[in-house]
Image: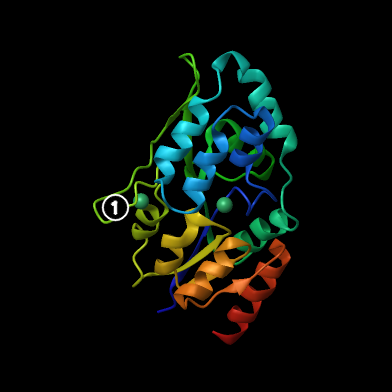
Amino acid sequence: MKKQRVIFCDFDGTITENDNIVAIIRHFNPPGWEAIVNAIVSQNKPIKQGVGELFRLLPTSRKREVVDYAISNARIREGFADMLAYCKDNDIQFYVTSGGIDFFVFPLLAPFGIPEDHIYCNGSDFSGESIEITWPHPCDGECQNDCGMCKTTIIRRFPAERYERILIGDSVTDFEGAKLADVVFARSHLTLKCAELGLPFHEYATFHDVIHQLKLQEAKS
Ligand SMILES: [Mg+2]
Ligand SMILES: [Zn+2]
């Protein structure tokens, strides 16, 4: 029996052209952010801890500015709407698995009609002095990486026997998922990591590249 295809698509640097968390922090430039970002990227600090620390540098009194900046600054990668249409037409399940934050992920995806239960990301709490990130999708017992939003936990809910698991990503938050996936689409840092790990991947620049490759695979199967 043919397996059900399911896509797990990263948000920051994948659906959007740049990393929104880094863009926000760089724009507001609170003292100490660079060391935290470097520690996350070099995998010397768990993502959950690092992202939590970064947002704690921002006061909730600037909520409106932070939210407005995040939403107005982001650019959606070319071909994303076509990608969703392709998935719908070809019975491919599409999930957003994002280490980003609800206050920019949901507004930026709103025009695309993705069901909310197909969007996984972190939450935010503006009720205190500084922005507190919340973690509704933590690692299961199989993952020791303290991801925050755990992509592999979500991927494991789709067993390999029944699903062809396709990952689209760009960076450090996608490494572990790439090891589990049957097919990997990578750009930027993720291409280097896949090469280093000896994992096969397809490089993409736009979602049209991804669609093109999916069509080739469909034709072969
Ligand atoms: Mg990313
Ligand atoms: Zn995890």
Colour convention of the picture: rainbow
Which image quadrant: the N terminus? bottom left
Which residue is at 67% across, 33% downward?
A: 70
Q: Is residue 18 left or right of residue 220?
A: right
Q: Residue at x 48, y 41 (%)?
A: 121
Amino acid found under the numbered disc labelled 1:
Gln
When the figure is inspected, residue 144 is found, relative to residue 73, above or below; the finding is below
Q: Residue furthest left?
A: 141
Question: 112 or 19, which is in the foreground?
Answer: 19
Q: Residues within 10 Å of mark 1 (few under 14, many from 20)?
A: few
Q: Does the residue tagged 1 have its C-beta within 8 Å of any atom of ligand 2?
A: yes
Q: Secondary structure at mark 1?
A: loop
Q: Quadrant of residue 134?
A: top left
Is 64 positioned to the left or the right of 72 in the image? left
Q: Residue 65, percent across and down?
A: 68, 21
- The location of residue 4, given as percent across then percent down, is 45, 68
| Residue 73 placement (x, y as % from top left) | 73, 37
Q: Which residue is mark 1?
A: 144
Quarter of the image where one finds residue 26: top right
Q: Is residue 58 above or below residue 85?
A: above
Residue 161 lies left or right of residue 165; in this view the side is left
Say which of 164 and 14 sits in front: 14
The image shows residue 174 at horizontal and vertical percentages of 49, 58
Q: Pick out the residue farthest to the bottom.
A: 220
Which quarter of the rendered picture does the C terminus lie within?
A: bottom right
Establish if 125 lies above or below 101.
above
